[in-house]
Amino acid sequence: MAKIKPFKGLRPPRELVTEVASRPYDVLNSEEARAEAGDNLKSLYHIIKPEIDFEPGMDEHAPEVYDKAVANFNAFQQNGWLVQDDKEHYYIYAQTMDGRTQYGFVIAANVADYMEGRIKKHELTRRDKEEDRMKHVRINNANVEPVFFAFPDNEELERIIKDVTAATPEYDFVSADGFGHHFWVIDNEDTISRITELFAAIPSLYIADGHHRTAAAALVGNEKAQNNPAHKGDEEYNYFLAVAFPASHLKIIDYNRVVKDLNGLTAQQFLEALEKDFVVELKGEEEYRPAALHNFSLYLDGKWYSLTAREGRYNDNDPIGKLDVTVSSDLILRDILGIHDLRSDKRIDFVGGIRGLGELKNRVDSGEMKVALALYPVTMQQLMDIADTGNIMPPKTTWFEPKLRSGLIIHKLDD
C-alpha cells in the first residue's frame, strides 16, 4: 500500500516563480544552464547546476561545486526567494502541452515503499549517477527536485483534482519552451486526510521518469534512518518529493534510434535482410510515422519505409518480448547491424520523439548517421505490466514530455 504524507513545501513567492523555476538538472549541460540562467541570480540552476557559478570547464562533481549548491540554497531562503509553508499540504501540479493537460498530486513519498518494492521501477540505474544526486540531497538536506510517478486511475482522486483545480491556481505560467505550468495548494484538512487514505489503498506507485533521482532520494533517507540511534520512522527524512499522476493522464513519446553504418552491407542488402522478419514497404520522401504496435518507420538514403514485423517474430505473452524496442533491438540492431549493447555501442544514438521525425531525417541527411529507426511508443499499461512482473525495460525505451519543472516546490528533510 502506498504510504504518503503532506509536507511543508519550500517554494517561491508567486511573483518570483518564473525567475526561480528551471528545467530539470539532467536535460541540459552546464553551458546550456549557464546560458539559460544568464544574469538571473534567482534561477534554480544556481542550486541544481552550481558549476555555472565557476569558470567554464569546472568539474561539476568537485567538492567546492557541491559546497556552492549549499551556499546558494541557503541564500535563496535568506533572501526570501524560497519560503516554507507554515503547515503541511498536498499540492496539485498540472502541465499543458499541445492542448493536453495532465494533473498530478505533489506528495511526500515513503522511503520504505521504495526500498521494499512498492514504488516500482522499470529501468536500471547507474551507481555513479545515483551517487551524484545522493551527494546533492545529503548536503542540502532536501529534495530540491521532484521525481515523476504514475498510479492506477482512481475516480475519487480524479474528483478531488477537479474540485481543487476549479479554484484560481497559486502559480500559472508558460515556460520558454511553450509548456504551461499550473499549481494549486490543497488547504482543506478533510481533503488532505482523504488523499492520504486513498493513496493508502493503492497497491503500488510507478516511477515514470527520474529513476536516478528516486533511488538517490530513497537511499539518503535510508542512510539517515540507519545513522539515527533514536530513529522512530515518522521523521521527515523517511519521505521524499514526488509528483504522482493518474496513469491515463500521461502520454509516453517515442524514443527513436539512429545508426552510423550498415555493418558492411549496402542499402539494398540491408533492405533484403529486413525482409526475413518484416514486411518492408517503400513510402517515399514524405515522413512516415509508425501506425501501430510492431510497425516501424525506417529512413535510409532519402526515403522512408514501413516495416511490419511478421507473425511469430515477437511474443505478445511476454511483457518484454512484445515491446517494439525489444523486437527492433533483436531483429534489426543485433541480428543485422551487429549492435549488442545499446548502453555502450558508439555506433548508435537515441533521439527523443519530442524532436520529431525531422530530426531523424536531418541526422541521416547530414551524413552523420546512415539509417534511422522510429518506434511506436510504449503505453503506460505496458510500463506498469513490466514493473509489476519485476522486469526491466531495455535501455532508451520511454520518453516523457513535458518534464516536471524544478523550483516550484522543494521538500526539506528536517522539517
Image (cartoon, grey):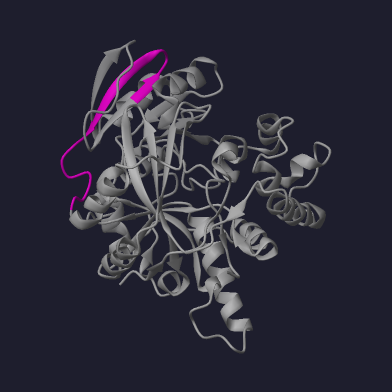
Q: Is residue 216 left or right of residue 94?
A: right
Query: On the rendered structure, is 392 left or right of 278?
Result: right
Q: Is the residue 155 above or below the residue 403 in the image? A: below
x then y, percent, for residue 197: 28, 69
- State the image coordinates of residue 73 (x, y, percent, origin top left): 70, 53
Total numbered labels = 0
Please indicate, yes or no, whether residue 203 appears anywhere in the rendered image. Answer: yes
Name the residue nearer the viewer: 178 or 216. Answer: 178
Q: Is residue 302 magenta?
A: yes
Side of 35 where 402 appears, left or right: left
Is residue 61 a member of the stretch shown in magenta? no
Residue drawn at x 57%, y 35% is 18
The quadrant of the image that shows the N terminus is bottom left
Residue most extreme to the left: 311
Q: Which residues are magenta?
A: 298-316
Farthest residue to the top: give it.
Answer: 285
Any part of residue 331 in sight: no
| Residue lying at 26% horizontally and 29% vertically, measured from the top left | 275
From this viewpoint, which residue is outermost toward the bottom? Answer: 229
Percent coordinates x, y for residue 233 in the rendering:
49, 81
**Relative height, residue 295 to residue 241 (above, below):** above
Q: Is residue 106 left or right of residue 11?
A: left
Q: Viewer-proximal residue, 282 or 193?
A: 193
> Viewer-proximal residue, 5 or 262?
5
**Which quadrant would the C terminus be assigned to in this image?**
bottom right
